Image (cartoon, rainbow, N blue to C red):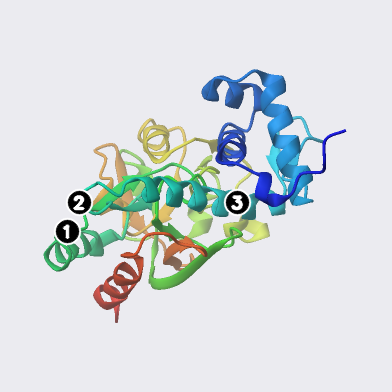
Amino acid sequence: MSPARTRRDLELRHLRCFLAIAEERNITRAAARLGLTQPAASRTLATLETTLGVRLVDRSTHHLTLTPEGETFRVRAAAAVTAFGDALDVGRAEARPLRLGHSWSAAGRFTTPLLRRWRRAHPDVPLELLRHDDRTAGLASGSTDAALLRGPVDSPGLVAVTLFTEHRVAAVPSDSPLADRPELALADLAPHPVALNPVSGTTTLALWPAATRPTRALTVANTDDWLAVIAAARAVGVTSAATPGMHPHPGVTFVPLTDAPPLPVSLAWPDRTTHPALPALVRLAQEITAGA
């Protein structure tokens, strides 16, 4: 019988397999992506869980989900894989780009000043703004080094600083009577279906008081689909005040909301970050948004 594995026996293939499963939410698809058989991927995951002594994946439901421990490990595994790749790039002349993720609207009106001032101050480290339609804007998968996130940041393994807050606005079809109003209240939207983006959005039906809560919702997967269903007069929506400037749409009119709570905008990163330029980005972001 082979001796029990220790954490030193784990290899990058275990981490890469887990990250693929976490992203695909399906072992068969993850195996195909990695060029493995499904049983091989399952064995690799089982070895990882046994060695760590924790359950990373919940298989008790119809859809594969990560346990709280799995969510935390996902961020750290992604950082470890990225760090390993950086270590192998010793012959690369230029610095690795600092990847800044966002789900939509980036830093709003501060986006352009942030990008331009970074380029002047750090010409040797490119700052790449990357859109990812997921809750952590690429942090959980290791696709980004830091991210601009809206709403509470409660994903395990992440550190965040709040930069500023934004007012919320209603998004309505441009030919709707609501589009002619100077301002709206949440109750004005309640009789209509509400477009919700559970993948990366911040609006849920809980935003409305129970007495005026909408009874119909239309689920979409990203910002583009969210705009499309509103422009088609199939729904209305609620978003941050940055959306009109970053995502204008000829069929959608944005109207100020008088009674919706403001939305915090944060800069977040893994608690075990690997990019040496991250502290400089945090300082610059806080400097640019100070007093907002």
Quadrant (top left, top right, bottom left, bottom right) of the C terminus: bottom left
Q: Nearer the viewer, mark 2 or mark 1?
A: 2
Residue pointed to by mark 2: 94
Question: Nearer the observer, disc 1 or disc 3?
Answer: 1
Choose between 84 and 208: the one closer to the eye: 84
Name the outermost residue toward the bottom.
291
How far across and down, in percent of the image, does residue 197 sit? 51, 42
Q: Residues within 10 Å of mark 1 (few under 14, many from 20)?
A: few
Q: Is mark 3 on a helix, strand or loop?
A: helix
Residue at horizontal 60%, vertical 23%?
31
Residue, x 64% and y 18% (percent of image)?
37
Q: Can residue 46 be seen in this view?
A: yes
Q: In this view, does 104 lie to the left or right of 270?
A: left
Q: In which quarter of the image is the N terminus?
A: top right
Q: Name the residue under label 3.
A: 205
Which residue is disc 1 drawn over? 124
| Residue at (56, 49) in percent of width and height | 77
Residue type at tag 3: Leu
